[in-house]
Amino acid sequence: MNFSAKHRSEIVSRKSVSLSRRRFLYGAGIALALPRLESFARAESHASEAPKRFLSVYHPDGVGLPLKSDPAWKDWSWFPRGGERDFQLTKVLDVLEPLRNEITIYSGLSHPAVRQVHGHSNADQYLTGAATGGHGPYKNSVSVDQVIAAHIGEFTRHSSLVLSTNGGIGAPRGAQTQSFNHEGRPIPAMNKPKQIFDTLFVASSQDAAAKLARSKSALDFLIDHTRSLGRKLSSHDRQTLQQYLDAVRDTELKLAKAQQWIDTPLPQVETSHLNLDADPTEAKLYFETMYELIYLAFLSDSTRVATFQLGRENGEGPHDLLSLAVGLRGAHGLTHAVKQPNGWKNLGTYNRYQAQEFGRFVEKLKNTPEPNGSGTMLDNTFAMHGSASSSFHLSRNYPIISAGGKNLGFNNGRFLKFGTGNEDNQAGAGITTDAGWRGKVEVEELPLAQLFVTVLQRFGIETDSFAGYKGTLGRV
């Protein structure tokens, strides 16, 4: 095929602009990914399509589900009351009321292969649906985020971002990561804000660390490099770039403070070094910083897939400190103390805090427009928040919230109930001992894998099954 000189020139020009879009600002061993800008997006071959993004946030230990006969049921039961559109949020989720039209709440979903397994052993299979079991031989399978990452990861510097409060991989049935590769092996999670920031934004070089140590801010090396770029941008893009740099700087300052907490070994954290028992500010700051890093990773298009696990099931560790942010001790212990005075309220208060921080992240995406005019970042992001157990480690009726995805075909503002026999979400409610999860639950639920099939198809992946389960959730 012959091309004219003009045609060849246009191709080279488009490639140059496209490469500029993907370029990083460099300075003194530091690399900062650019946000998506309309000046570059117009010339890209896929400019008409905004990036599709996926986030899954996992929290251990389930949620509070008191019985209807318990006075706490009115305010502190996690699931809403009412119908699909006229649902009423209790005090646990009412922090999401301003985002009502952007979220969907699910009940009646779980993974069939592990419904008789104690909830403390189930974090591993939340995104995989594998029959990991409660004891004996262990084998996992690929997580849904990694299927998506394999499909769209080529467009970003990092195919996925794997985070957790505890970091690493943990152990079988005690995973500290939500992501598993195509061989079912766990992918180590990062948990230190500085490590995550450096992975996303700091170039590797022998003297980069030394130069950073001598600088009050990594961005000081980059400001000069944005000036020449700024002259090539539209006024809208110049404003976007400045907002982006301000957001990065703000996050950098916060993570510098949060690093002091997360870098401290747990025994020291619990003593006088950070005084967390007296002042939970650092725990709250850490949580906020991790979400901000995910936001920046999406905003810079460094990745389009992320997972964030808020602690290991059945294990103390950094995640246990997150409840300090709302003035409570030991996140895991809250589930064992629901029959004590204010027990349901305390657990509900912590679940409310988790929802609040997720909502804050969702609000940021909602307030950030896509550079090509395809709505907001939230419109092109499917973000979910959930756990692999409901009431006191019962591996049924996973409490799940999703947000966004309007441009992916998701219709929000709904409370969706699946299966039969548990329309009021009282199956397993009121359980307060480990004997409860062994009991027989007379309800039918649908496989959570069907939601994942739906998500995969919306991301353009041709499949009709996941984890051995076929079909989609037709109402989603």
Image (cartoon, rainbow, N blue to C red):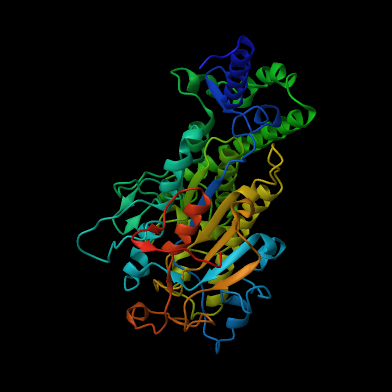
Q: Residue furthest right?
A: 235
Residue in the foreground of this view, choosing between 99 and 113: 113
Q: Which of the image's four quarters has the C terminus?
A: bottom right
Q: Is residue 452 left or right of residue 234?
A: left
Q: Residue furthest top?
A: 5
Give the image location of residue 138, x and y in percent: 24, 58
- How many labels, in total? 0
Give the image location of residue 215, x and y in percent: 59, 22
Dividing the picture into quarters, in which one does residue 239 lie?
A: top right
Dividing the picture into quarters, in which one does residue 258 lie?
A: top right
Is residue 177 depicted above or below 224 in this figure? Answer: below
Residue 257 in view here: no
Residue in the foreground of this view, choosing between 169 and 104: 104
Residue in the foreground of this view, choosing between 441 and 153: 153
Give the image location of residue 459, x and y in percent: 51, 49
Q: Residue at coordinates 30% horizontally, 50% vertically from top-left?
A: 184
Give the image location of residue 371, x and y in percent: 69, 37
Is residue 102 depicted above or below 336 in this figure? Answer: above
Q: Is residue 405 left or right of residue 440?
A: right
Is residue 86 depicted above or below 41 in this figure? Answer: below
Q: Is residue 355 left or right of residue 333?
A: right
Q: Residue at coordinates 45% horizontally, 82% vertically from top-left?
A: 427
Residue in the foreground of this view, choosing between 99 and 86: 86
Q: Residue furthest bottom?
A: 69
Q: Residue furthest left?
A: 136
Is residue 275 depicted above or below 249 in this figure? Answer: below
Residue 303 in view here: yes
